[in-house]
Amino acid sequence: MELKEYFPEGQVNHLPFMGENWLTIAEGDHYIHLPKKSLTARELFLLEKCDLIDDIAQSSSSPWQDYLLLKKGPSPEALGQFQFIFLEHKVALPEDLLELFKSLIPSLVTVVFITKSRTALLVDQSQDSDFLSLFTDILPTIESDFGIALSVCIGNNWLDHNSQGVRGYFTEENLLLTSYQEQKGEKQLFSFSELLLWGLLTQVKLPILEKYFYHHLVQNKEISDIVLTLWQCQGNLVQTAQKLYIHRNSLQYKLEKTKRQTGLNLKNLDDLTFAYLFIHKQ
């Protein structure tokens, strides 16, 4: 008999957290939430004894947990430019490791405990830090010093020009990461452009992300011209500048501007391929 049949008043969904009035049990790719007031002391004891209750889901709520996972209320903080770093882990992250992240990333806004095995770091990216390089350097040390294996996905650097809010980007990045790992498995470290390209080719539905890139890549003729010409010139900057009748330094400036606006580094093949295919898809 399914657990839901024993507790018909429970709710089943994909949210790992429902608030302090619920007990949450992970079951496969979804969660069963049981209202505490409906449980007897004996039932509660047995659930705890069998180690079924999800520890992350029972932790005290925070404004960011409510906003991102429960979709409650406005964003706790206005962030014009931000990035998520997703951490996959087999065991709970030690407090010392979380403190290390806080010391290495001064712009860390909050730590979001998504599930027992997935945690996200929300970072203010107004200073445009390179976290892919940072984690490339520190992952071996983390594994050695803490005895913990991490799989790290560096999310996109989002510029929230239309005040979409952090939640929409978080939800779709998290969904894309889950879909990618179900099909491709885990890697130790990968960038968001790998996920984007895979998501585009496999037609994962991401309306908020699609709207974002449509605005920056398709509606902006200057950027779309650069993407198409750079693709035709196989990434050669000198030839691209000549075809666009601009100085190479001017092209470099425009590429940096595009990176700030979209998070895409068009000098990277994955990023350029995604941008080119996205424009042609429209």
Image: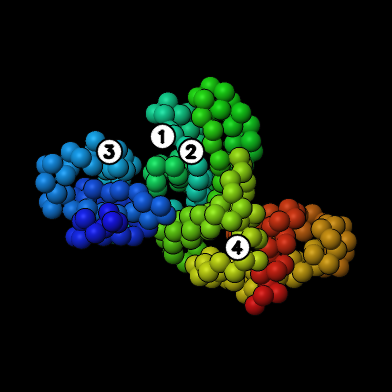
Mark 2 element type: strand
* Amino acid at dot 1: Ala
* Cα–Cα gap, marks 4 and 2: 23 Å
Please name the residue that numbered disc 1 is placed on.
92
Residue 208, position as x, y percentages in the image:
49, 67
* Percent coordinates x, y for residue 138 in the rendering: 59, 30
Q: Which residue lies under the disc numbered 3?
A: 50
- Helix, strand or loop at label 1? It is loop
Q: Is residue 136 left or right of residue 51?
A: right
Q: Residue under circle 2? A: 89
Kind of residue sitting beneath label 3 = Cys
Q: CA distance from mark 1 to mark 4?
A: 29 Å
In contact (CB < 8 Å): disc 1 and disc 4: no
Q: CA distance from mark 3 to mark 4?
A: 38 Å
The residue wearing badge 4 is: 199
Label 3 secondary element: loop
Neighbourhood count class around disc 1 (C-alpha, 10 Å): few under 14, some 14–19, many 20 upward: some
Q: Amino acid at mark 2?
A: His
What residue is at 39 percent from the left and 46 percent from the top? 115
Q: Earlier in the sequence, mark 3 or mark 2?
A: 3
Residue 185 at x, y percent in the picture:
59, 49
Farthest-out residue, top? 145
Asked whether residue 161 appears in the rendered view, the answer is yes
| Mark 1–mark 2 CB contact (< 8 Å) | yes
